[in-house]
Structures are given as structure tokens and as C-alpha cells.
């Protein structure tokens, strides 16, 4: 490729809300999405909540001419819901599943059953290598009392680690998806500050779409306004982020979103609005990351993870205490059951039916609390691991901020000040 500046790519992202038999007008909307993608012919298409592989195969067949290369990321009980379609050849793919993703007993939310993850695809765009990521983070069901905030912060932390460690050799990095975070939420700031990814909506001067770039609208027929809380008009939680490298950088020429219902149809493509970003490659260097600001963000993230860790430890202790009570009750039952054998001729002091029901209750308590103990132990370990990683990262950033080297050469010799005896711990020459 002779001139990097001449290359333009169009990136599309949409949360399809494709829960078969549950999402409204699911089949019709997939047909609409397929027709639109065939017509628009984006270079890269990033889809979330494609929960059924049959729907992915339907889109794959429909887009075989416009997007001959595709991949469906499989994960969890019902899948990750992530899919990518591309005009450019896909050379490699990888999926990383987040260590924390809600609670199994919150079945009405359903996040735990979906394998929330980040999918990566390595593409060739001319002579450039592009790492393209698609992801979907845990939903925020109540902004005032968000019990999932520590989980979403850990997911953001793992996402930025995954992007940084896998994109070292890439010329172009693009990330799209439903982050379920407002632009200035902690996890969002952590992701953008640490990776250097830039927000298409913020960077472009040519935007066409919903007011303030909103991607979840209050007047969407698939949305309950109660879900939006105080944000009556809607919220912006879907993003297309990008960055370049020392060789290549990208600028966002334009960005657009859909605006509710599709012309000629009584309903929109999804409960989310679709995003399209037109990116142009440039020979400019990315702005340096502000270390001081990054230190503050990582510190805030670590504090939030510590709060989640404290809650998880408290819930694990409650499960342990309840299990102990159930075990004590079961032991008491065994003692009562032994009365007829210890006192010959004595009758069982409790009715047999009540005795068995109590035994079943004890067993259910023990089983439930044991499962909860195991789950909360897994949550504690994941939060502890994330907190340890943040602590190490914070130490490195603080060293960089102070201008100290991160490590001393192992063969560097220490010189004792004049007039002082060498320390007893100094190695002998």
C-alpha cells in the first residue's frame, strides 16, 4: 500500500437483542439487519447479543457476498452473543471470557448464563495488521444501587489488559460493542486511559444521529422508560473506539447512529441504536498517556474493587454461618433420632412426617449454602486477583510519575558514603 492516508474503513456496531422466542420481532429484525448490511457494505461489522448460532448462520449466508469473512465466538451456557463480519480476511481469532459476570441466582437478569467476553480478530487491511475487538459488558440495572459495579470494573480492567497485551504488534486497533457504561463512568475512563483508545463520537467533527450520540433511547418501543431512570431521553452506552501505533494512527472522519424506527417498518433494528464510524488512516503519532490522570483512575478502580471484595467476603461469611446453623440442626436431628436406640422402648418424640421435613430442610440449607460458599469464594479470588494486578500497575505508574527507574540492574554495586562502615548485609567483594 503506497499511501496510508488514502485508506478509509467503515466500522459498524450493533447490539441486536436477539433472544429467540423472547425478544420481540426477532426474526423480522434479523432480516432487516441483514438487508441493511448488504446494502451499506461496511468493512467491519461487530454484533452483540446474537445469542442463537442459527441466527448467525442466517446472517452469514445472507452476507456471503458483501462480507465473505466472519466468525462467531462461542462461550458460556448460551454463548457469548458476539460475532464479526468482515470484507477483509480474518487470519486469527481469540476469545477471552471475563472472570466475573453477575450471579447465577439472579436468573431474572440472565447475565451470568451468557458467557460475557471479548472476542478478537486479526485482519489484514492492505499491508496493515488490524486487531479488531468486540465485547459486551455486564448490564447496569440500577444506577443508584449498582451491585454489579465491581464486576463491571473488573471486566473493564481485564478488557484493557487483554487489548494491551494482544495488540502490541498491531498497526490498527478497533474496539466496538455495548460497554453498558456512560462515557465518564469509572470503567470507561479506566479502559480509555490505560489503552489510549479514542472515542469516535468525541473525536469526530462530523456526526449524524441521535442527540448527544445516545444509543439507548427513551422512545424506543422495545425499551421501558423505568430502565433509564432519570435519563428520560436515553443514554450512550455503545461505542466504537480506536487507536493506531507508531506506524499508523486513525482519525474519525464521520460517525452516525440510527434514529429509532426503520423507514418502511413499524419498529427499529433493536432496542439499541446502531453505530457507524468512518475511519481514515494517518501518519501521525498518538498522544502520550497522562500518567498522573491514569494513577487517579487506577486508584479509584482499585477502591471500587476493594468495596466489592468486602461485600463478597461478607456474603461468604453469611453463607458459612448459615451452613453451620444447618449443620447444627442436622446434628440435633441425629441426636433425636438416636433416642429410641439409646433409651430402649422409648418412642420417637416427634411425628415422623415433621422429622423428615426438617431433615429435608436441613439438607437444602446445607446444599444451597455450600454452593453459595463456592461461588462467593470464586468471586473473592477473582476480585483479589484484579486488586493485586491493580496494585502492581499502580506501583509502576507511581514510579514512572516520580521519574524513578522501575528496576535496578542486578549487578549494580552499592557505594557506602565516605566515613561510614559497610553494612553487614553488603555482599563481600
Image (cartoon, rainbow, N blue to C red):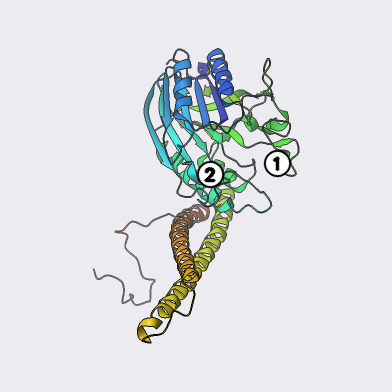
- Residues 312 and 364: in front is 364
Instruction: Write down the quadrant of residue 411 in the picture.
Output: bottom left
* Residue that lies at the very extreme toward the front in this rendered image: 345
Instruction: Write down the quadrant of residue 306 in the picture.
Output: bottom right
Q: Which residue was labeled with disc 2?
A: 111
Q: Is residue 128 above or below residue 235?
A: above
Q: Position of residue 234 (x, y in %)?
A: 71, 36
Q: Is residue 189 left or right of residue 368?
A: right
Q: Position of residue 129 (x, y in %)?
A: 41, 26
The N terminus: image quadrant:
top left
- Residues 226 and 10: in front is 226
Instruction: Write down the quadrant of residue 427 in the picture.
Output: bottom left
Q: Is residue 131 left or right of residue 261?
A: left
Q: Is residue 141 left or right of residue 105?
A: right
Residue depicted at x 39% and y 56%: 407
Residue depicted at x 50% and y 17%: 7
Q: Is residue 13 above or below residue 390?
A: above
Amino acid at each position: 500500500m503506497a499511501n496510508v492516508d488514502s485508506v478509509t474503513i467503515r466500522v459498524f456496531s450493533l447490539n441486536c437483542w436477539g433472544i429467540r422466542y423472547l425478544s420481540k420481532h426477532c426474526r423480522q429484525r434479523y432480516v432487516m439487519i441483514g438487508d441493511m448490511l448488504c446494502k451499506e457494505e461496511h468493512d467491519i461489522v461487530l454484533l452483540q447479543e446474537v445469542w442463537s448460532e442459527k441466527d448467525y448462520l442466517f446472517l452469514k449466508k445472507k452476507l456471503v457476498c458483501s462480507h465473505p469473512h466472519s466468525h462467531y465466538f462461542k462461550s458460556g451456557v448460551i454463548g457469548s452473543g458476539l460475532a464479526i463480519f468482515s470484507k477483509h480476511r480474518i487470519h486469527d481469532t481469540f476469545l477471552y471470557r471475563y472472570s466475573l459476570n453477575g450471579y447465577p441466582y439472579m436468573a431474572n437478569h440472565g447475565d451470568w448464563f451468557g458467557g460475557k467476553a471479548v472476542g478478537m480478530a486479526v485482519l489484514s487491511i492492505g499491508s496493515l495488521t488490524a486487531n479488531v475487538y468486540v465485547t459486551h459488558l455486564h448490564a447496569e440495572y440500577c444506577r443508584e444501587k449498582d451491585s454489579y459495579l465491581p464486576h463491571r470494573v473488573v471486566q473493564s480492567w481485564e478488557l484493557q489488559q487483554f487489548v494491551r497485551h494482544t495488540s502490541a504488534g498491531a498497526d490498527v486497533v478497533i474496539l466496538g460493542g455495548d460497554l453498558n457504561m456512560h462515557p465518564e463512568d469509572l470503567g470507561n475512563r479506566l479502559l480509555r486511559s490505560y489503552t489510549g483508545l479514542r472515542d469516535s463520537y468525541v473525536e469526530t467533527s462530523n456526526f449524524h444521529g441521535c442527540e448527544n450520540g445516545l444509543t439507548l433511547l427513551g422512545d424506543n418501543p422495545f425499551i421501558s422508560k423505568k430502565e433509564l431512570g432519570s435519563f428520560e431521553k436515553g443514554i450512550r452506552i455503545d461505542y466504537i473506539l480506536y487507536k493506531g501505533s507508531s506506524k499508523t494512527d486513525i482519525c474519525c472522519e464521520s460517525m452516525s447512529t440510527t434514529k429509532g424506527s426503520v423507514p418502511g417498518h413499524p419498529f427499529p433494528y433493536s432496542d439499541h441504536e446502531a453505530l457507524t464510524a468512518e475511519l481514515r488512516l494517518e501518519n501521525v503519532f498518538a498522544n502520550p498517556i497522562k500518567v498522573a490522570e491514569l494513577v487517579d483512575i487506577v486508584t479509584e478502580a482499585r477502591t471500587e474493587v476493594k468495596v466489592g471484595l468486602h461485600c463478597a467476603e461478607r456474603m461468604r461469611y453469611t453463607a458459612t454461618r448459615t451452613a453451620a446453623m444447618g449443620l447444627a440442626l442436622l446434628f440435633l436431628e441425629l441426636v433425636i433420632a438416636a433416642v429410641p436406640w439409646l433409651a430402649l422402648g422409648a418412642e420417637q418424640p416427634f411425628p415422623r412426617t415433621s422429622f423428615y421435613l426438617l431433615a429435608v430442610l436441613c439438607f437444602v440449607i446445607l446444599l444451597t449454602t455450600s454452593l453459595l460458599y463456592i461461588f462467593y469464594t470464586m468471586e473473592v479470588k477473582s476480585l483479589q486477583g484484579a486488586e493485586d494486578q491493580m496494585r502492581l500497575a499502580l506501583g509502576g505508574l507511581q514510579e514512572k510519575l516520580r521519574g524513578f527507574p522501575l528496576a535496578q540492574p542486578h549487578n549494580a554495586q552499592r557505594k557506602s558514603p565516605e566515613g561510614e562502615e559497610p553494612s553487614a548485609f553488603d555482599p563481600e567483594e
